[in-house]
Every structure is written in structure tokens, then in C-alpha cells.
Image (cartoon, helix red, strand yellow):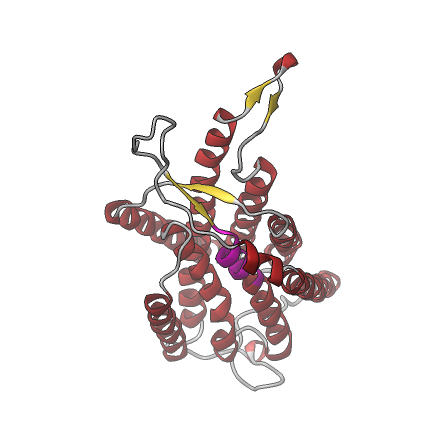
Amino acid sequence: MTVDSDKISSLTGLPVWFTASPGFTAINETVGLTEYIAAFLIGALSAYCVYIKLRNKSSISSNLTTRSPVEISPAGSQEPAEEIVWTKLLFNTIVTGYIIVTFITFITAAIFGVGKLWSAIGIYHNVLELCLVASLLQKGTFNYIIGLIVIVVYSTSAVAITSQLDWYWDATFFKFQGVILDFLLAALFIRVAIPTHNRRRSESQPLLGGNFMSTSSLAPRYQLICLVVAATAHLLGNLSNVIGNTQTIPFIIFNLSYFISFPLYAFYVHQAEKTRIKYVIPDTSFFKFILLVLWATSASAIAILLSFYHN
């Protein structure tokens, strides 16, 4: 496929996916401005999250404990229950890495343009999303050997396929596989937030006036909301960009979504590092996992088809 001259990076001479639309000079300046501000903001949040992790490293190591995945009833008999797991160490580290890698992808996108060359860096944004999805599906744990194999196979395959496809099919594929993870992450955060909130509510003690005093060690509602809103805003921003086919206004919405998502992720890390956080993780059978993946894949495919229609 022939690539227009305005779709070629002035730095690398290679085809790029995201370019400014002609005829909207003033808005295009806004696009560039929002992109640079978002990059600066995410960079500052990355540095802050690293600072928090380093500051609390010694206290985290001394407080690490192991919990049974099955609740024990007061009478001492085991009851089938949703698994309750500690996720502070691993999960917060992945979220911090997610913010850092996103900052790197923003900087490299501004330097090289978003295209085949950039995909070798941009894929790590998706890799960290994959790690978040895996930690939620694996009840807060992570098998490092299997995880490393999956990451290598996934990232290598995605970049290899992207590099072999013609322009603009390479961008279409890269968006398609990335939006699948965005759908999965938002759905899994909601899937964790609802039972965790309900369990925390049931463990709270009623007070006069209809209020409740929480005595539960489960994650408070505002932390759950942070994760759900952050993932949902990021998903909606990506959908706007995908369906809008990288036009100016959808691209501005895409950039602005980062002003919501990643400050919330950083706020979550800030709060979660103060105290150990416990979540109710619903059981995910192989059948449920397949249904989730099929749902996310179908939703991503519909978004891609809408982008063709919009174009």
C-alpha cells in the first residue's frame, strides 16, 4: 500500500500511524500541547511512585506475611468462599511499572512518531496491562517463569506481526490487540470491586443514623473506584481514538484520558502503600476465562470495524 508523504516520519523516514489532520492548525497545536503535558504529568507521577516504593521498601519487607486463600468460619469449619488475597507487594509494583512504561511510550512516540518502529517500545505498555490482568486472574499471585514465557511470546509475536503487515493494517492490528487488554482490565477491576465492596459492607458495624463503621481489612471503596475509573477512562480514551481513526478531536480525547487514568493509578499506589490491602478475588475457571477473552476480543473487533465505517 502506498503511503502518503504526510504519513512519513520526518525523523526516521518510516511510515507512521498518528499524524495531524490538515486544515486544523490551531487544534493540532492543542493536540501536541496535550500530548506533551500528558507526558510530563505521567513522568512526574512515575518519579513519585518510585519514590514511594523506595521509601516504604524496608517496612514492606518486614511486614510481608502469607494468608490462607480460604476463609475459616468462626466455628472453625471451612466454608466455600471467594478467595481473599493480599496484593500489595506485587500489584502495586506492577501499577508503578505501568505508569513508568507509559511515560516511556509517550516520550518515544513524541520523538519517533507512532508507527512500526515505535511498536517495539509501545508493546511494553500492553505487557504491563497483561501483567495486571494476570495478577487479577491468578488471585493476586504471579508465576514468574510462566509469566516470563507468556510475556516474551506475546510481545515478540505482536511486534513481529505488526512489522510484517502493510500500512495501515499494522496500526489496525496493534490497536486491536491493545484494546482487548483494555477491555479485560476494566472488566476485571469491576469484577473485583463489586464483591470486595459487598464483603466490606457486610463486615461493617451499623451505627445510629444509618451509617456504618468499617472494621474490615478489605480495600476501601475509594481505592476500588480509583482502579475502576482509571481503567475505564483509559479504555474510553482508546476507543475514542480507534473509532475516530486518529482524527483530531478523538485524539485529543485520547490524550485527555491520560489526565484521568494515570493520576488515579498514582493516587492508588500512594494510598495502598500506607497499609496492606486485601481484595476479594472471584474464582475464574478456565471456561470463565475463555468467555472473558472472547468477549474482549469481540468488543475490540467491533471497535475496529466501526473505525472502518467512520473512515
**Furthest residue to the left?**
287
Secondary structure of the magenta portion, mostly?
Answer: helix
Q: How many marks?
A: 0
Residue that appears at 61% across and 38% down: 222
**Furthest residue to the top?**
209
Is residue 167 or residue 238 the one in the foreground? Answer: 238
| Rendering coords of residue 253 (x, y %) | 62, 53
| Rendering coords of residue 105 (x, y %) | 57, 70
Taking 31 as reference, is 288 left or right? left
Quadrant for the N terminus in the image: bottom left
Is residue 256 or residue 212 the one in the foreground? Answer: 212
User: Please, is residue 265 above or below residue 124 in the view?
Assistant: above
User: Please, is residue 11 above or below residue 157 in the view?
Assistant: below
Residue that appears at 55% across and 65% down: 97
Which region is colored magenta?
Answer: 87-96
| Rendering coords of residue 9 (x, y %) | 59, 81
| Rendering coords of residue 265 (x, y %) | 60, 53
User: Please, is residue 239 above or below residue 282 in the view?
Assistant: below
Taking 24 as reference, is 181 left or right? left
Res 305 visible: no
Check if residue 210 falls in the magenta segment. Answer: no
Is residue 220 or residue 224 the one in the foreground? Answer: 220
User: Please, is residue 73 above or below residue 92 in the view?
Assistant: above
Residue that appears at 51% across and 51% down: 235
Q: Residue 55: name its quadrant.
A: bottom right
Res 262 visible: yes
Is residue 182 or residue 86 the one in the foreground? Answer: 86
Taking 40 as reference, is 249 left or right? left
